[in-house]
Image: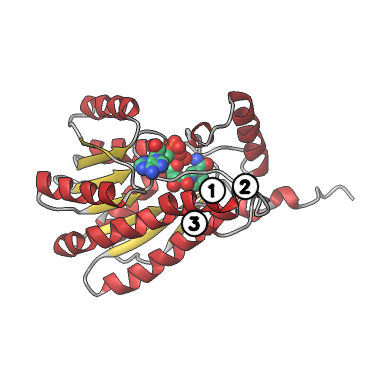
Amino acid sequence: MSFNSKVVIVTGSSSGIGAAIALKFTAENAKVVIVGRNEKKLKDITAKCEQLGSKPLVIVADVSKGHEAKRIIDDTVKKFGKIDVLINNAGIGGGTSILHDKAMDVFDRIIATNLRASVYLTHLAAKHLIETKGNIVNISSVASKSVISDEGFGYATSKAGLDHFSRCAALELASKGVRVNVINPGPVKSDIYENAGATPEREAAIWDHMKKATPLHRITEPGEIADLALFLASDKAVGITGSTFVSDNGYLLGGYNILKKNY
Ligand code: NAD
């Protein structure tokens, strides 16, 4: 799968899934644009990309702020003259009760990052992707397909919205030669809970719970999601658009709710 001279934007690439995607595309000779808010972590990923043979374009930006999202597209086109692939990966977790005083603040913050930013970046990138017959991969979650947390309405709604937006964009852009697809990961080892403010103890407890909740009894490594993203962005997936791909160690099978057959 060669991405030789393809220009690939990966949002939220300072850690976790986004970092793994940026590294895989770099290894495939793409011109990678890494985007995040944490300059130190972006420097670490830059060094890893350089070890693989090329320096990424680094854009420090908050995707939830309109003018910063616009800068991501403008700076990329200024530097490389085109965009071939947009990976909308930046996302935040977090939950709250619908009864909580601050419920709407939490909801607005999650929607702004997980949904609105992906819609806006698609809007801004679309005309460039039409030029290159490029494609988009949106990183959603199994939370879009099943209600998996009792106080996760904001996150789940943002990801369900992202799935359906992706189908809408896929239909409209298909006639222009642009594909749009979605990956729905289950639990993936990343900084997501740390970034949501969990203590190391709480984080360890969450991973332990998640592992037990998957029929395969494992947590996905970020590189596994990156491999799927690479496939969907490549010409091998030329006939795939508007589709969602679950990679969750069987989490959605719901086996953890099923009684063991010992009766
Ligand atoms: P992570 O916290 O390690 O990475 C998220 C990245 O997005 C970070 O680099 C963070 O700085 C960046 N980011 C967040 N808000 C941003 C903003 N406003 N502007 C710019 N960058 C921003 O977590 P991750 O697990 O790698 O998450 C990547 C994506 O995968 C997210 O969309 C998340 O919802 C999704 N996901 C993760 C899991 C999981 O279990 N880790 C499961 C399903 C879906």
* Pointer 1 residue: 106
Task: Assess disc 2: are there few (<14), some (14-19) or many (≥20) residues with their C-alpha within 10 Å of its C-alpha.
Answer: some
**Residue 31 appears at what percent x and percent y?**
18, 41
Q: Residue at x 23, y 47 (%)?
A: 72
Upstream in sequence: badge 2 or badge 1: 2
- Label 2, label 1: how many angstroms apart (C-alpha)? 7 Å
- Label 2, label 3: how many angstroms apart (C-alpha)? 14 Å
Residue 218 visible at all: yes
Task: Assess disc 3: are there few (<14), some (14-19) or many (≥20) residues with their C-alpha within 10 Å of its C-alpha.
Answer: many
Determine whether, in the image, residue 248 is placed left or right of residue 90. right
Give, as a three-letter code, the residue at label 2. Thr
**Residue 111 appears at what percent x and percent y?**
46, 54
Upstream in sequence: badge 2 or badge 3: 2
* Residue at the front extreme, as displayed: 101
Give, as a three-letter code, the residue at label 1. Val
Q: Residue at x 36, y 55 (%)?
A: 118
* Pointer 3 residue: 158
Q: Secondary structure at mark 2?
A: loop
Marks 2/1 in contact by CB < 8 Å: the verdict is: yes
Q: Secondary structure at mark 1?
A: helix
Upstream in sequence: badge 3 or badge 1: 1
Residue 223 visible at all: no
